[in-house]
Image (cartoon, rainbow, N blue to C red):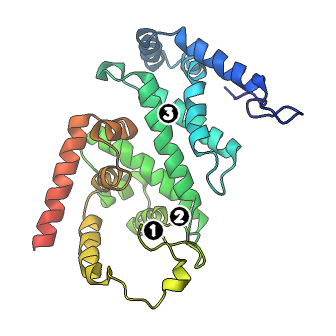
């Protein structure tokens, strides 16, 4: 289950080779040979039997979906194409493991959203402003996975204490892992500011009046309210209001029903409102 080494290789005369195009076309043809019903039947049989050959058949028929997602982000700073491809392939395998044909969503759509979400997390996890200890980085991935599993089995977002007990690790370690996952890359002082109006380098703006200063207290209150939410509520709110995904897209990425996403959004916003009012 690998991409052709020649997919992105150019010709000696500088023109793009047709080898990559032919390989991608062949993969699309392979996927086209399987109808949505056939894919669903293969996945159902794989879930029943555990025969990985069935899973691999679905994955190989949809490698072009993973490749399409990789090509969309392959120029991201600091990420090699091979790392992106490996992440996309693992996400595709997880998509087969989690896909439920009865929900009415095609596997191609579900896989694309799953891969897109994993690639975003991969790129985000690589961009540490201050690199946390390796233990915290590794535990962050384990905590996220266990949170998903507990939410699926219990029908609600688990608390930090429940995740801690399930993993048999101290609560402080779980909190440290979650904090590590929120790390972000630092921006150089010479880099252009992200402000849509004033694009001067950040260094030139230091010391200037900040119109957003008046809202610092409000942002702190909101941050405090967010930290009081369950892990799954925070995840869904971030996907909705930070990553700007729709409810159906969130449901596909997280692997739950759209109605469950709606309930999480509503409960999360209600709890934040209560904390802000109080």
Q: Residues within 10 Å of mark 3 (few under 14, many from 20)?
A: some
Q: Which mark identifies residue 94? A: 3
Of residues 215 and 200, the one drawn nearer to the viewer in this rendering: 200
Horizontal relation, residue 171 to residue 273: left or right: right
What's the residue at 53%, 31% (across, down)? 92
For marks 3 and 2 on the same chain, the one whose residue lies earlier in the sequence: 3
Outermost residue to the right: 12
For marks 1 and 2 on the same chain, the one whose residue lies earlier in the sequence: 2
Horizontal relation, residue 212 to residue 199: left or right: left
Residue 157 screen position, x and y as percent: 27, 49
| Residue 53 appears in the rendering | no
Residue 195 screen position, x and y as percent: 43, 70
Above or below, 41 against 251 in this view is: above
Q: Residues within 10 Å of mark 2 (few under 14, many from 20)?
A: many
Q: Which mark identifies residue 136? A: 2
For marks 1 and 3 on the same chain, the one whose residue lies earlier in the sequence: 3
Q: Secondary structure at mark 2?
A: helix
Residue 212 screen position, x and y as percent: 32, 79
Q: Which mark identifies residue 176? A: 1
Q: Quadrant of residue 19?
A: top right
Q: Secondary structure at mark 3?
A: helix
Q: Nearer the viewer, mark 3 or mark 2?
A: 3
């Amino acid at each position: 289950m690998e991409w052709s080494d020649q997919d992105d290789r150019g010709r000696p005369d500088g023109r793009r080779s047709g080898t990559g195009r032919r390989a991608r076309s062949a993969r699309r043809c392979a996927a086209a040979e399987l109808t949505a019903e056939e894919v669903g039947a293969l996945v159902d049989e794989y879930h029943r039997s555990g025969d990985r050959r069935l899973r691999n058949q679905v994955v190989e028929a949809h490698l072009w979906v993973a490749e399409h997602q990789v090509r969309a982000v392959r120029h991201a700073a600091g990420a090699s194409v091979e790392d992106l491809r490996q992440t996309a392939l693992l996400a595709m395998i997880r998509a087969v493991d989690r896909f439920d044909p009865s929900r009415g969503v095609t596997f191609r759509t579900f896989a694309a959203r799953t891969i897109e979400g994993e690639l975003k997390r991969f790129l985000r996890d690589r961009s540490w402003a201050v690199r946390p200890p390796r233990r915290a980085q590794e535990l962050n991935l384990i905590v996220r996975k266990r949170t998903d599993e507990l939410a699926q089995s219990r029908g609600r977002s688990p608390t930090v204490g429940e995740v801690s007990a399930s993993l048999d690790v101290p609560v402080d370690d779980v909190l440290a892992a979650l904090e590590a996952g929120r790390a972000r890359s630092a921006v150089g002082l010479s880099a252009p500011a992200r402000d849509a109006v004033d694009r001067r380098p950040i260094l030139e703006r230091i010391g200037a009046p900040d119109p957003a200063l008046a809202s610092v207290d409000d942002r702190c209150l909101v941050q405090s309210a967010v930290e009081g939410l369950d892990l799954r509520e925070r995840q869904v709110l971030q996907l909705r209001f930070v990553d700007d995904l729709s409810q159906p897209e969130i449901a596909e990425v997280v692997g739950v029903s759209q109605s469950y996403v709606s309930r999480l959004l509503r409960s999360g916003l209600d709890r934040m409102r209560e904390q802000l009012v109080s």
